[in-house]
Image (cartoon, helix red, strand yellow):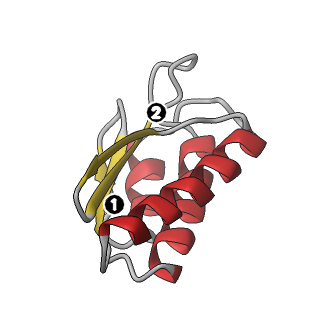
């Protein structure tokens, strides 16, 4: 996957396809609220497996039922296509566990 930084138009166009995700040139982020704490942790566990397979790891903040994911390609200095691909995977996993 590409590690080229996305320009503002590319990033904004792709964010429009990701419900509730937002960001800027440095990172993209989304917070999901799950039905229960353990459900959120299960979703994080699945995201961790996907992230490991992609060799691209999000920052994850767990606060009771709310889990916030933040993505950036540090080696590129901002948001790349790799971040967008992982964001789509995170969205699929989170919503499959009832995350909103």
Q: Residue at x 42, y 71 (%)?
A: 39
Circle 1: is it few (<14), some (14-19), or many (20+) Cα within 10 Å? some
> Can you tell which mark lies on residue 72?
2
For the C terminus, the image quarter is bottom left
For the N terminus, the image quarter is top right
Circle 2: is it few (<14), some (14-19), or many (20+) Cα within 10 Å? many
Q: Nearer the viewer, residue 16 or 82?
A: 82
Q: How many marks?
A: 2
Residue 62 on image: x %, y %: 30, 49
Residue 22 on image: x %, y %: 29, 55
Label 1: state its secondary structure: loop
Q: Residue at x 51, y 64 (%)?
A: 42
The residues bearing labels 2 and 1 have C-alpha atoms spaced at a distance of 13 Å
User: In screen coordinates, is 72 left or right of 84?
Assistant: left
Residue 90 on image: x %, y %: 52, 61
Quadrant hosting residue 15:
bottom left
Q: Residue at x 53, y 81 (%)?
A: 96
Tell me whether the residue at label 2 lies in contact with that at label 1, contact meaning CB atoms closer than 8 angstroms.
Answer: no
Dot 2 or dot 1, earlier in sequence: 1
User: In screen coordinates, is 61 left or right of 3?
Assistant: left
Q: Up-down: is 76 above or below 26?
A: above
> Can you tell which mark lies on residue 9?
none
User: In screen coordinates, is 51 left or right of 93?
Assistant: right
Q: Nearer the viewer, residue 64 or 58?
A: 64
Q: Residue at x 40, y 83 (%)?
A: 98
Q: Nearer the viewer, residue 99 or 54?
A: 99
Label 2: state its secondary structure: loop
Quadrant hosting residue 34:
bottom left
Which residue, given by chain and number where applicable, does mark 1 sit on?
21
Q: Up-down: is 77 above or below 12?
A: above
Q: Up-down: is 1 above or below 47?
A: above
């Amino acid at each position: 996957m590409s590690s080229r930084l996305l320009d503002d138009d590319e990033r904004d166009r792709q964010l429009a396809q990701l419900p509730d995700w937002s960001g800027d040139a440095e990172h993209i982020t989304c917070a999901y609220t799950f039905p229960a704490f353990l459900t959120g942790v299960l979703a994080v566990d699945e995201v961790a497996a996907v992230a490991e397979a992609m060799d691209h790891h999000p920052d994850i903040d767990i606060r009771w039922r709310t889990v916030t994911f933040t993505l950036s390609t540090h080696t590129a200095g901002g948001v790349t296509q790799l971040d967008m691909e992982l964001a789509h995977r995170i969205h699929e996993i989170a919503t499959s566990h009832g995350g909103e």
